[in-house]
Amino acid sequence: MALRSLAEEPTQLYVTVGAPTDDIYEATTRPLMRGAFEMLKETLSLLKNFSCPTVFRITSARGLNMVKPEEYAKLCLSSEPTYIEIKGAMSVGYGIRSGRMDYENMPTMREVEEFAGEISKMTGYNEMGKDENSRVLLLSRLRKPIRFKWA
């Protein structure tokens, strides 16, 4: 696994979590490798070993993976990320051209907030910020965000 063999830590580490369970992961992401969800869970298990900020990112799509917040919460709690970022999927680029999603899969900001709220209640991560234009909401257990200072 690539994360285990890094020569040095990155300044921050994002892991995109496409679904909360193996069956939803298979249907939503259509992985090319067998056991991809298990590999994702193994990757998530490494997050707590990094000293840099880590981000558990959910790109949420209505009717596809905005389900089972309790399963996302379990994955979050086991990986102990610095942040949980819930981003509403936007029907642009590859997603729309490939036919994998359509405009009806784009959640509203209110739906993103409600979904994030459910995950927040189950994890103890609190809202730290949001951007309505991007339909993204950030959760953390920190009191204030980490600001990186260049050397």
Image (cartoon, rainbow, N blue to C red):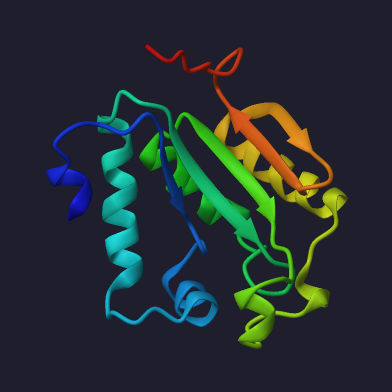
Task: Write the residue at 63% across / 83% down.
Answer: 100
Residue 108 at what x, y percent from top left?
A: 85, 57
Task: Write the residue at 26% across / 41% down.
Answer: 46
Viewer-side residue, 21 vs 43: 43
Residue 53 at what x, y percent from top left?
A: 42, 28
Task: Write the residue at 17% across / 41% down.
Answer: 6
Task: Write the residue at 73% across / 64% down.
Answer: 90
In the image as oriented, which residue stretches furthest toward the front? 151
Relative to 44, say whether 141 is above or below: above
In the image as oriented, which residue stretches furthest toward the bottom? 99
Q: Is residue 7 left or right of residue 108?
A: left
Residue 133 at what x, y percent from top left?
A: 83, 46
Residue 2 at what x, y percent from top left?
A: 19, 52
Q: Is residue 2 left or right of residue 98?
A: left
Q: Is residue 1 left or right of residue 26?
A: left
> Where is the N terminus found, in terms of image quarters?
bottom left
Viewer-side residue, 95 vs 19: 95
Residue 111 sits in quarter = bottom right
> Where is the C terminus found, in terms of image quarters?
top left
Residue 98 sits in quarter = bottom right
Viewer-side residue, 70 vs 100: 100
